[in-house]
């Protein structure tokens, strides 16, 4: 809703987790852009919960798919040691 992604560094055990969370939340930004989509997310959340919510499933799948490539790209650019 705020079009802002806030990461809490202390709640992640590794950079890999941070990258995964960032990708996950960015996918939500891409998927939930309108009030109608926001309401659909909330409806699913109430009806079937967090784990089975289709928006959450998609965000988890996308994050798992792209985290390694993101970390490799950061390393290739010299941003990781």
Image (cartoon, rainbow, N blue to C red):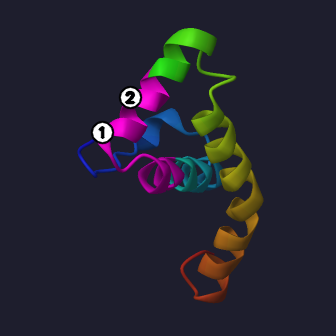
Q: What label does residue 35 carry, if any?
A: 1
Residue 35 coordinates in the image, percent (x, y): 30, 39
Give the residue at mark 2: 39
> Mainly helix, strand or loop, the magenta region?
helix
Q: Secondary structure at mark 2?
A: helix
| In the image: residue 79, left or right of residue 32 | right
Q: Residue at x 28, y 52 (%)?
A: 3
Residue drawn 55% across the image and 39% down it? 12
Q: Quadrant of residue 68?
A: bottom right
In the image: residue 79, left or right of residue 75: left
Q: How busy is the neighbourhood of tag 1: few (under 14 within 10 Å), some, or many (20 plus)?
A: few
SS at badge 1: helix
Specify the farthest residue to the left.
Answer: 2
Quadrant assignment for the N terminus: top left
**Residue 74 appears at what percent x and percent y?**
60, 78
Q: Report the span colored magenta.
A: 25-42
User: Does the magenta run of residues contain 10?
Assistant: no
**Which residue is the extreme one toward the front?**
36
User: Is disc 1 in contact with disc 2, using a CB cutoff of under 8 Å?
Assistant: yes
Horizontally, residue 72 falls left or right of residue 50, namely: right
């Amino acid at each position: 809703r705020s079009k802002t992604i806030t990461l809490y560094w202390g709640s992640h055990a590794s950079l890999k987790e941070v990258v995964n969370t960032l990708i996950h939340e960015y996918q939500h930004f891409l998927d939930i852009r309108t009030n109608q989509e926001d309401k659909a997310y909330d409806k699913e959340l109430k009806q079937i919960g967090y784990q089975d919510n289709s928006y959450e499933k998609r965000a988890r799948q996308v994050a798992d798919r792209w985290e390694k490539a993101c970390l490799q790209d950061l390393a290739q650019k010299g941003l990781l040691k």
